[in-house]
Amino acid sequence: MNKMGLEEYKGVYVFAQQVDNQLSGIALELLGKARDLAKDLDTEVAAVLIGSDIKNLADTLAEYGADKVIVVDDPELKDYRTEPYTHALASVINKYKPEIVLVGATAIGRDLGPRVSARVQTGLTADCTVLEIGDFPLNPIPNQEQKHNQLLMTRPAFGGNTIATIACPDNRPQMATVRPGVMQKIEPIKGAKANIEEFNPGFTPDDKYVEILEVVKSVSDTVDIMDAKILVSGGRGVGSAENFKLLQDLADAIGGTVSCSRAVTDSGWLPRDLQVGQTGKTVRPNVYFAIGISGAIQHVAGMEESDIIIAINKDEDAPIFDVADYGIVGDLNKIVPQLTTAIKAELANK
């Protein structure tokens, strides 16, 4: 791509993931972020909607901030498959020339994003936690051009021990994946109507099109911890799978949901979909109880946006106390049952 070509690329585009004709929350979160970026660049926000018979979802995308919705609708796109979806999104990029493309770091997005970036010959920064428009290099370097209005993509690196800010100054689009729960949706713009553009690059099944024989849905009756308003989260300090009953009792009393740190899932005490942190889920509940959690940087990255953080730990030097709003130093086996009893008594008096 020559230098002259870069100016042709305009707009902030979001891959609007849908599954079974339902928009994924990440699509709406990314539109919120895209609006901020587009404002700084004085450009438009476009959602790219890929699937079969999905045009009905376009107005929702408009309500959450899309100025236009590009719909790629084809029977071959009914279920997510790598090749047809890659062809769809890469074709949109080649035709519309967006400056920025954002993709959710979901199972689908982690498969699709890298494939598309390779096909359109640009870079991709994975698992970003902060996206902003600025200068690159961040600080001017003698004899090197400092470029303005670049997408600065920040992500944890080296296991979360450092934060790297990455740019893609010489290729377009600038692509990033963002994990769910990191960016925030806007308040929906009631009654917004989508400016829809339909585009179909044509789909010819070939040997790269896998054949889906059966879709098996896992049935889960647990609340997704990303949606919970109160999380009672336990770490290695809880001691055993049986001991999580103390946390469950507290969660039941207060109307919360149990979650955990990576040490707990690694030990097999709780399933992985309850794990908070860099290799788990990013959560922002109103109240987060961190019980027997030391507070490694990888865990904190997944819960530091919680409104109120209450830490209980017998080690007064545990790093979790650095991010906690309230901290109790002591034995969780004594404190948690007392807390549960006190909350039950308080609610009984209401």
Image: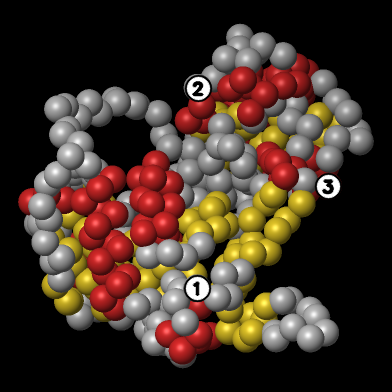
* The label number, if any, that marks residue 171 in the structure image: 1
Please, what secondary structure does the residue beneath circle 2 have?
loop
Would residue 187 be visible to someone looking at this image?
A: no
Question: Which comes before the other along the chain, label 2 or label 3?
Answer: 2
Question: Based on the displayed image, in which of its 4 quarters is residue 236 positioned?
Answer: top right
- Quarter holding the C terminus is top right
From the viewer's perspective, is the residue at label 2 or at label 3 nearer?
A: 2
The residue shown at (86%, 26%) is 314
Kindly indicate whether the residue at mark 3 contacts the one at mark 1 (C-beta within 8 angstroms): no
Say which residue label 2 marks.
Answer: 271
Say which residue label 3 marks.
Answer: 322
- Residue 55 is left or right of residue 185, and the answer is left
Q: Return the x and y of residue 97 as percentages of the image width and height.
A: 34, 78
Marks 2 and 1 sit apart, C-alpha to C-alpha, by: 41 Å
Which amino acid type is shown beneath numbered disc 3?
Asp
Which amino acid type is shown beneath numbered disc 2?
Pro
